[in-house]
Amino acid sequence: MPKYSTGDRLRIFTWHIHGSYLYYLSQGNYDVFIPVNAAKSEGYYGRGETFPFGDNVKEVPAAEVRNMEFDVILFQTDENYFRDQMDVLSEAQRILPRIYLEHDPPWDHPTNAPHPVKDPDVMLVHVTHFNQMMWDNNGQRTRVIEHGVVVPLAPYSGHLNKGIVVINNLPSRGRLLGLDIFNEVRKEIPLDLVGMNTGDLGIGEVLHPRLPSFISQYRFFFNPIRYTSLGLAVCEAMMSGMPVVGLATTEMAVTIKNGQTGYVDTNIETLIEKMKYLLDHPAAATLMGNNAKEYASERFNIKRFTTEWEHCFRQVIHENLRS
C-alpha cells in the first residue's frame, strides 16, 4: 500500500523542469520536493540560484527520494514518467496519487497525436484549453489549470520606443517559434530579443527575477511564436502592464483583445502596422497596458492558480483512497 505523509500540509514530489513554472507553483500552501544529483542533470538541478524559492521548495538527494513520504507525484515530462520514476521512486511511491502536467501542445501532429500517458489512474493536467483540445487524451480524465503569475514590483514605463521579444534558443528553434517572423518584422520595427542562446540576434539572457523590470521599459511585448503553449512571458508582460502583440494562433487568440490589451493577427503586415501605431502613440500603449494588467490580474491571478492546484492535489488523493 502507498504510504502517505502525515499532517494537513501536502507534500508534492516533482522534478525541476521549468524553473519559472516551478516558482509560481511553489507559491501555494504545500511543500514541493525536488531531486538533485551531483551531475545536475535535467530535472535534477535542485533549487539552483536563479529563482527566489521559498523554504517550501526542498531539495532531496536523488538516492534518498525512495525513503521519503509524499502525498502526490507530479510528472512534467515523458522522461519523468517513463524513466525517472523507475530510477528514483520506490514501488510504493509509484502507486501514490499521480498527475502528469503537460506543458505543451502536441508536436508530432497538431490534431491526431495521442498523449503518451495512457494510465487511467493518472490525472492529466493541461496549462491551456487549446492544448487540452488539440491533444488526443485517450479518453482519460483531464483538467485545465491556467497559468498564474505574481504581480511584478516594477511598473510599466514604456519609455524605450521599441518592442521586446522574450524567447530562449530562438536561433536554433526556427520557424516553430517564429525566427523568420522576428527577422521579417525587425526590418521595419526596432526589436530587442532576450533569452538564453540568442547569439547575434539578441541581448542574451536576463535572469527571471530581473526580467519584469527589464521588459517594462519597452513600448510593447512582441510574441512571434507560431505554435507552442501560452508562454509565461506573455502573462508576465501583461501583468507588468504592457500591451502585447502576437499571432492569433493557439491560446493567444483568446488571450489578447485587439485594440484593448494589444493586437493579434495572422497577417504579419497588419501586426507591423499595429506596432508602428504603438510606437507613435505612447499614451495609447499605456492605456492598453493598463487594460492588459487588469485582465491578467483576474485571469492569471496567482491565488487562483495555487488554489486550483491544491484542489487538484486533494482530488487525486481522494480518488486514490477510494480505489
Image (cartoon, rainbow, N blue to C red):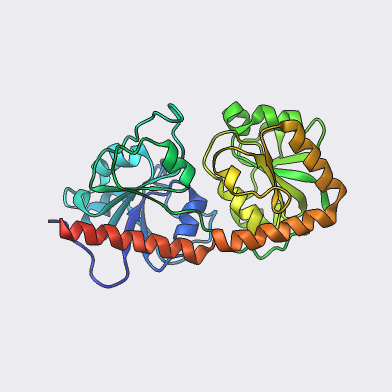
Q: Quadrant of residue 81?
A: top left
Q: Left or right: where does residue 4 sit relative to residue 271?
A: left
Residue in front for this viewpoint, 34 or 270 = 270
- Give the position of the N terminus as an image quadrant: bottom left
Determine the residue located farthest toward the left in the rendered image. 1
Determine the residue located farthest toward the right in the rendered image. 280
Residue occupying the point 44% across, 36% down = 134
Q: Left or right: where does residue 185 sit relative to residue 252?
A: right
The reply to whether residue 176 is in sight is yes
Residue occupying the point 35% across, 35% down = 115
Residue occupying the point 77% across, 50% down = 218
Q: Quadrant of residue 111?
A: top left
- Give the position of the C terminus as an image quadrant: bottom left
Q: Is residue 153 above or below residue 138?
A: below
Q: Left or right: where does residue 236 sit relative to residue 309?
A: right
Residue in front for this viewpoint, 54 or 75 = 75
Residue in front for this viewpoint, 262 or 213 = 262
Residue 162 percent across, percent down from the top left: 80, 45
Residue 168 percent across, percent down from the top left: 59, 39
Residue 238 percent across, percent down from the top left: 65, 55
